[in-house]
Image: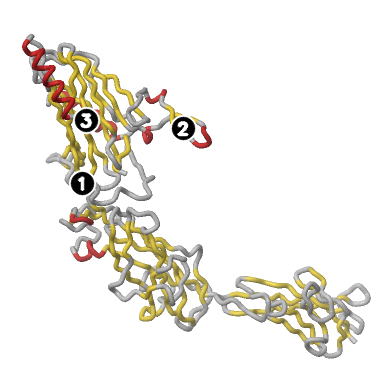
Amino acid sequence: MRLVRQLFTVTGLILLSAGYAHADDIKLVNQAFKEVAVVNAKGEKEFKLVEPGTVVPKDEILYITTFANTGDQPATDIVITNPLPNNSRYKAGSAFGAGTEISYSVDGGKSYGTPETLKVSGSAGQTRAAGPDDYTHIRWVYTGELAPGAESTVTFRTIIK
Amino acid sequence: MAGRGYKQILSRLAAVLLLGYMDSSFALGTAANTVINNTAVVDYQVAGVPNAVNASVAFTIEELLDVNVVSLDAANVSVVSPSSGRQLTFLLTNTGNGSEQFLLSVDTALAGDNFDPVPASARIWIDANGDNTLDTLNDILYNGTNGPVLDGSTPGNDAVAVFVLADIPAGRTAGELANVSLIATSVIADAAGEVNNVGAEITAGGDGGVDANIGVSGAQSSAIGTFEVVNSGVSIAKSVLVFDTQGGQDPHPGAVLRYTLQVTVSGASSIDNLVITDSVPANTTYVANSIVLDGVSQTDAGDAPGVDFSDFNISNANTVTVDLSQGGNITVVPPASFTIGFEVTID
């Protein structure tokens, strides 16, 4: 990755002289939260996101990935890829991202598809429809341009095995 | 992060939560002290130039202190009064995600039953060889500090059978019940004074120095096993029907007496060498080949494998003998019953 980054940096420098982009225009922040129920002053139950200090099996984790354009040029062709964390199961239907098309991989990120198209090999050489437990990666394809100074988020949830 | 987008996310997430997602399908949870890593990658282009950056987040799974005890006895355990060393069987499972030792205790003074087994004699054995059968040579007698260490994240090492032995006092009558509970408590939770304090966190109390958290069980669980007093041993109910020569029921000379012996084996103990004998009454004569066992005609000849184990006037003089042990080969396990019939004529 470092080598690739350096190559891009060199490319960016060349392009910079022509008034184009430089490296790492996008700042990426990845956060994990646990949602806890708390009772507020009015005695109502509400949910609060906290840093995952205390996480035990069966807990639900919310991942928020924030991407911000810190450069001075619009960013295009933005694709966020997130492999499912170890010891975690994707929570069905939880992936979300405004202005994105979301697809999933069941083969370690080689190919992606929508939930209804994904298949995995089942018993006796048969294939079966893939379920959330089969997902290995989630991909968000941002359909628009991200203007300089703009930011957006994609999220998904997991359950700790 | 844009405040509005965040709020939107939260409201959607709350809606998902309200659907009441419950998942109890995990047999064994992720082990305590496991690091959960996640790295997101963003690929993008600026002015046609591709680039990629990534960002990671990680956290460590803490330990959950949870335990479950169930009775392994399929029904009330039949006992006779008095008797000693009667056994109840339980299964203790570490339903947490770490390696934990458990304290064991027995409570015989429970409400809702008829009597208490003798508490002083209640003994706890741990099924060290994993065969779910008490074997005092290979299993371990609990001494208050050598409770089982179970790993809730390792299949096969997360559960153990526990046997509780108790004495049944004298003077109890059939049908009376005695409840006994086995209680298992996490040593760590007990030491920290947090038993049954669900959600409490014990700093550095978990595997590898992570915090330990009291789970929904309160880090303590119990289950009840029940003894039921039954009448002991073998009982025989004998009845007779009279068939006179006139088609009536008058016991005059020449009338046939058909005797029926209803043999009932009850209680907690298996019975070896169960042989039923009934001497032919005075002034009557045995009707040849009239012995019937459970609807099957028996011969009067001596016992032999492949024939039958009933005879008349061979094992015992002028006596019907039915060997229910089939020559000592069959152990009768209660509850069991047998119906024996034979006939005599009045001289």
Q: Are marks 1 and 2 on the same chain?
A: no
Q: Can you see residue B280?
A: no
From the image, tell me which residue sits under label 3: B40
Relative to residue B202, is residue B312 drawn left or right?
right
Badge 1 is on which residue? B60
Q: Which residue is rendered at x = 33% and y = 61% of the image?
A: B150
Q: Is residue B177 left or right of residue B250?
A: left
- What's the CA distance linking mark 3 and mark 1? 18 Å
Give the residue type at disc 3: Ala
The amino acid marked with disc number 2 is Ser
Q: Which residue is identified by label 2?
A: A121
SS of the residue under disc 2: strand
Can you give x and y, in whole percent of width and height, for residue A75 in the image?
A: 16, 15
Q: Earlier in the sequence, mark 3 or mark 1?
A: 3
Measuring from the top left, give residue B113's x and y in whole percent: 42, 70
Residue at image x 28%, y 25%?
A: A139
Relative to A107, is B133 above or below?
A: below
Callout 3: 10 Å neighbours few (<14), some, many (20+)? many
Q: CA distance from mark 1 to mark 2?
A: 32 Å
Position of B68 compared to A33: left or right? Answer: right
Residue B127's place in the image compared with B311, above or below, is above
Residue at far right of view? B246
Give x and y (percent) for residue A137: 31, 30
Badge 3: chain ID? B
Image position, residue B45 (x, y; %): 18, 16
Say whether mark 2 and mark 3 are on the same chain: no
| Mark count | 3
Q: Chain of mark 2?
A: A
Q: Amino acid at mark 1?
A: Thr
Can I make out residue B200 in this image?
Answer: yes
